[in-house]
Image (tube, rainbow, N blue to C red):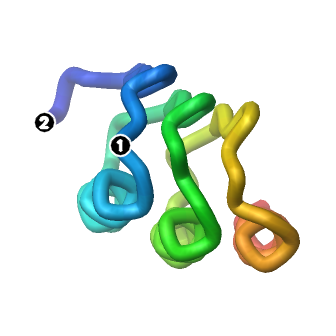
Amino acid sequence: NGVLTTLSLRNNLIGDKGAIAIADALKFNSVLTALNLGYSGIAAQGAIAVADALRGNGVLTTLGLFSCNMGDVGAIAIADALMGNG
């Protein structure tokens, strides 16, 4: 998709399986600049998948993860990915 720039899956309870699917799509993203995954039931496994997809993704500038239950492991994975993505 070369048109979609903002995607909100907030309150959709996609869980880790959904986050992994989104992460797979992010690896090929060239236009999505904003992604909201808040309140989506993502835990550590989903956060780690999103983090892996963020590495090298220079397009996404806004990522919403409010009230996800990713724990320390998931949060650290996201933070590490973002630190190397500047």
Q: Identify the residue under disc 2.
A: 1
In-image side of 6 versus 48 (left or right): left
Disc 1, SS: loop
Q: Position of residue 84 (x, y in %)?
A: 77, 75
Residue drawn 55% across and 43% down? 60
Q: Which mark is residue 23?
A: none
Q: Identify the residue under disc 1.
A: 14
The answer to whether residue 47 is seen in the rendering is: yes
- Quadrant occupied by the N terminus: top left
Query: Quick one: 58 or 67, which is closer to the camera?
Result: 67
In-image side of 80 versus 45 (left or right): right
Q: As displayed, is residue 47 above or below residue 15?
A: below
Query: Quick one: 48 or 79, which is closer to the camera?
Result: 48
Q: Where is residue 59 in the image (x, y as percent from the top left)?
A: 51, 46
Residue drawn 70% across and 61% down? 70
In-image side of 85 versus 53 (left or right): right
Q: Position of residue 15 (x, y in %)?
A: 42, 51
Q: Position of residue 26 (x, y in %)?
A: 35, 56
Q: Which of marks 2 and 1 is nearer the N terminus?
A: 2
Q: Check disc 1 and give the amino acid type.
A: Ile
Q: Quadrant of residue 74?
A: bottom right
Q: Check disc 2 and give the amino acid type.
A: Asn
Q: As displayed, is residue 28 above or below residue 49?
A: above
- Quadrant occupied by the C terminus: bottom right
